[in-house]
Amino acid sequence: METQHPFSIYNASAGSGKTFTLVKVYLKILLSSNNQNAFKTILALTFTNKAVAEMKARVVDMLIDFSDPSILEKPSPMFSLLSDELQIESQQLHEKAKIILNTIAHNY
């Protein structure tokens, strides 16, 4: 039986896509959860304040993009990737992103 670990570690050199990976994993956790407050239970660590700010901005920017109705007509690569990986219809992913973004905006 495979052991499930409660955390993941991504270790890679500069410019290798760590921030992209962290943002994708973070969004995947948020969008797959039935808890709209899941963002309060996720911890993502990085080594610089600049990287933290970039990660926060990317997560919020992605949720803003996902919440825009135009995403359904012209999905971004991240939207399509998450829809496929989570096996969630585009409309459902769009609606969930709106709810999460609204929750974050009112509780962050």
Image (cartoon, rainbow, N blue to C red):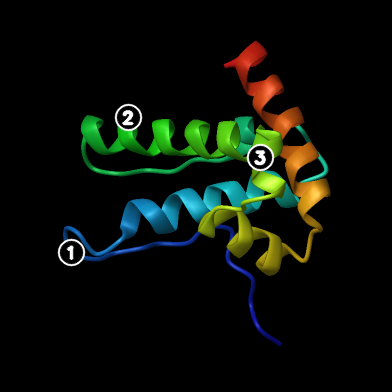
| Of the two numbered discs 1 and 3 in the rendering, the one whose residue sits closer to the viewer | 3
**Is any atom of residue 37 visible in this view?**
no
x and y, in percent, of residue 28 in the image? 62, 53
Q: Nearer the viewer, residue 42 or 33?
A: 33
Which residue appears at 38% of the width and 39% of the height?
55
Q: Amino acid at mark 2?
A: Ala
x and y, in percent, of residue 34 in the image? 83, 43
Which quadrant of the figure contains the N terminus?
A: bottom right
| Of the two numbered discs 3 and 2 in the rendering, the one whose residue sits closer to the viewer | 3
Q: CA distance from mark 3 to mark 2?
A: 26 Å
Residue 32 - label: none
Element at label 2: helix
Left or right relative to 95: residue 79: left
Q: Amino acid at mark 3?
A: Ser
Residue 53 - label: 2
Instruction: Work out whether mark 1 precedes mark 3 in sequence or the reverse, and give the earlier one.
Output: 1
Left or right relative to 94: residue 55: left
Instruction: Work out whether mark 3 precedes mark 2 in sequence or the reverse, and give the earlier one.
Output: 2
Q: Nearer the viewer, residue 86 or 83?
A: 83
Which quadrant of the figure contains the C terminus?
A: top right
Q: CA distance from mark 1 to mark 2?
A: 19 Å
x and y, in percent, of residue 83 in the image? 69, 60
Residue 70 - label: 3
Q: Amino acid at mark 1?
A: Ser
Q: CA distance from mark 1 to mark 3?
A: 35 Å
